[in-house]
């Protein structure tokens, strides 16, 4: 793999940047792999990368029906934070946060991780009680967090309406300075390039049409372009389409796929250098390096695989943003899109074994999967390599919906992931 | 955006008046005490979530506030039919 560096950039400028090595190969798959990962999004590619790097499992294929990082990795609002209430999720997301902090160096790829801080606003007394509880829980778990009053919020985000006259006055906020944003495409590309350099085969434009199962054990997958490909272990990391793969395996998951919409405005001058989220007025906003406001909110309530949602949802989202930032009321929106998010009843992911032996699932991230990309990939890789779940992944078994040990993050982290 | 026919109001109304309430036709176990953890968990949490024809429960929240069922394609979002609680769908997935 060609190392990227400032000197390399200079060297290639002499040949007009025409001789850069391709970031990854486009190989024809072998007949058999140690591990097949279904789904070449951020989580799938991170899994492949850590399998090769940390566990020496390099005979790995990632099978992607579209192109790499073309699903929810390309569609999210890029927010990274780890201020979750419950121990299980806090540990998992904090594991991801620690990996984020060294990710660009580790991958030799600038993922533009910017720790600009995340504000979660409170607008009611109950919001404030929840925020104080969550911040205290975070600090006990070694995660940075502060409770801010409106005056301190005003200092961080001077353009936000923190006055007592607004319809839902801002009463305070939780503040995680280590939170921030990252460049979503770069994350997928960095992991893809890293995985490829260890010899992982990234098979694009190939759809898994069925699973090959014998005696309740998976032995391979059927594909639409390369026929049957055998594997000792298979990891499914297909987000919104998890139910479809699960059906091939003959079981159901406690998931419902919903459209989640986001939108970006026209580029404007720097105005917002942090991430603002509000569960109560229900929206979140940050400004990208390009200058556009990146805006999102809740899911559409119905089940949908269409990667698009309904107009009223966008309207509610924008109402919330204008409520917080009246000055944005004249900003024009540039693009709007939807992704399919697989939501769990307890708003926590599933990283789990399944009723089919050697078939593992990483899914159910709902609206908050991007922030966990390196952490989820890391623990899922460890689980695939050993055949036993990583300790951080253990509480997220799909069988928790049978034994009742749910991780109820819904009210805790709120809807605005 | 959906334009939904409410079978109780016998009118088309805009989507904003409605709420989706998840999968339809989930019978509550007749004897919950006799359920195993697995059966109860599946009744509570496990859903069909198909890509294609799906039967859903909707409520006309800002209208007559009554529940009804809908058969809808989750990929194209086309509404195939609406029918009242207790009725069976005429369009089913093959």
Image: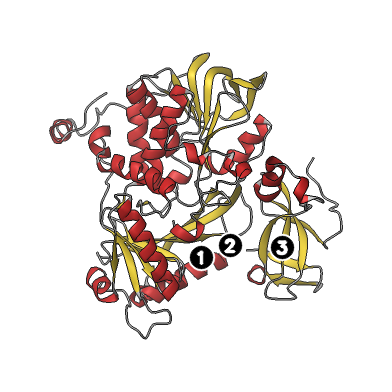
CB under 8 Å between discs 1 and 3: no
Q: How is the image coloured?
A: secondary structure
Say which residue label 3 marks: B58
Classify mark 1: helix, strand or loop: helix
Classify mark 3: helix, strand or loop: strand
Which one is closest to the eye, mark 1 or mark 3?
A: 3
CB under 8 Å between discs 2 and 1: yes
Q: Are marks 3 and 2 on the same chain?
A: no
Which residue occupies the foreground of this view, A129 or A365? Answer: A129
Label 3 – label 2 distance at C-alpha: 16 Å
**In the rendering, at what x and y percent does residue A152 appear?**
24, 72
Q: Residue at 46%, 41% (x, y): give it.
A: A70
CB under 8 Å between discs 3 and 2: no
Label 3: few (<14), some or many (≥20) within 10 Å? many
**In the rendering, at what x and y percent does residue B23 appear?**
71, 53
Residue situated furthest bottom in the rendering: A165
Quarter of the image that includes the C terminus of chain A: bottom left
Label 1 – label 3 distance at C-alpha: 21 Å
Residue situated furthest front in the rendering: B33
Q: Can you say whether A9 is above or below A328 in the image?
A: above
Say which residue label 2 marks: A310
Say which residue label 1 marks: A314
Label 2: few (<14), some or many (≥20) within 10 Å? some
**In the rendering, at what x and y percent does residue A140 appear?**
32, 53
In which image quadrant can residue A111 be found?
top left
Classify mark 2: helix, strand or loop: loop
Judged left or right of residue A27, residue A229 is right
Pinpoint the chain carrying mark 1.
A
Q: Can you say whether B69 is above or below A191 in the image?
A: below
């Amino acid at each position: 793999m060609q190392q990227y560096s400032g000197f390399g950039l200079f060297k290639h400028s002499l040949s007009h940047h025409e001789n850069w090595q391709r970031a990854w190969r486009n190989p024809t798959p072998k007949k058999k792999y140690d591990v097949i990962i279904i789904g070449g999004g951020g989580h799938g590619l991170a899994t492949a990368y850590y399998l090769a790097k940390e566990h020496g499992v390099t005979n790995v294929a990632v099978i992607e029906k579209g192109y790499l990082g073309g699903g929810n990795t390309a569609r999210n609002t890029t927010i990274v934070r780890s201020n979750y209430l419950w121990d299980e999720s806090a540990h998992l997301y904090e594991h991801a946060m620690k990996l984020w902090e060294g990710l660009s160096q580790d991958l030799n790829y600038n993922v533009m991780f910017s720790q600009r801080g995340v504000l979660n606003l409170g607008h009611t007394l109950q919001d404030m009680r929840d925020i104080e509880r969550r911040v205290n829980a975070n600090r006990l778990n070694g995660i940075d967090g502060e409770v801010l009053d409106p005056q301190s919020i005003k200092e961080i985000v001077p353009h936000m309406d923190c006055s007592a006259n607004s319809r839902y006055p801002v009463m305070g906020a939780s503040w995680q300075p280590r939170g921030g944003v990252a460049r979503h495409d770069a994350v997928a590309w960095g992991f893809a390039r890293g995985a490829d350099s260890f010899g992982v085969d990234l098979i694009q434009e190939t759809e898994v049409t069925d699973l090959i199962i014998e005696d309740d054990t998976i032995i391979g997958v059927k594909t639409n372009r390369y026929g049957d490909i055998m594997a000792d272990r298979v990891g499914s990391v297909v987000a919104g389409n998890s139910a479809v793969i699960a059906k091939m395996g003959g079981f159901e998951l406690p998931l419902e796929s919903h459209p989640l919409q986001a939108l970006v405005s026209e580029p404007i001058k720097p105005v917002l250098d942090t991430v603002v989220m509000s569960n109560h007025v229900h929206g979140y906003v940050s400004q990208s390096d390009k200058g556009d406001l990146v805006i999102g909110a809740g899911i559409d309530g119905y089940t949908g695989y269409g990667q698009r949602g309904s107009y009223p949802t966008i309207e509610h989202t924008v109402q919330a943003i204008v409520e917080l930032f009246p000055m944005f009321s004249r900003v024009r929106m540039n693009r709007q899109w939807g992704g399919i998010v697989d939501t769990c009843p307890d708003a926590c992911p599933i990283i789990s074994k399944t009723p089919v032996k050697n078939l593992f699932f990483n899914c159910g991230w709902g609206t908050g999967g991007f922030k966990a990309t390196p952490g989820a990939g890391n623990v899922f890789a460890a689980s695939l390599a050993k055949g036993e779940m990583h300790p951080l992944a253990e509480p997220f078994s799909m069988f928790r919906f049978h034994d009742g040990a749910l991780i109820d993050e819904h009210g805790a982290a709120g809807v605005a992931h | 955006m959906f334009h939904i026919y409410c079978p109780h109001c016998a009118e088309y109304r805009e989507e904003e008046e409605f709420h989706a309430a998840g999968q339809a036709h989930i019978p509550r176990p007749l004897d919950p005490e006799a359920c195993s953890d697995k059966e109860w968990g599946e009744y509570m949490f496990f859903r069909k979530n198909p890509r294609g024809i799906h039967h859903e429960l909707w409520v006309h929240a800002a209208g007559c506030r009554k529940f009804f069922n809908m058969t809808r394609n989750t990929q194209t979002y086309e509404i195939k039919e609406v029918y009242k609680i207790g009725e069976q769908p005429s369009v089913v997935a093959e």
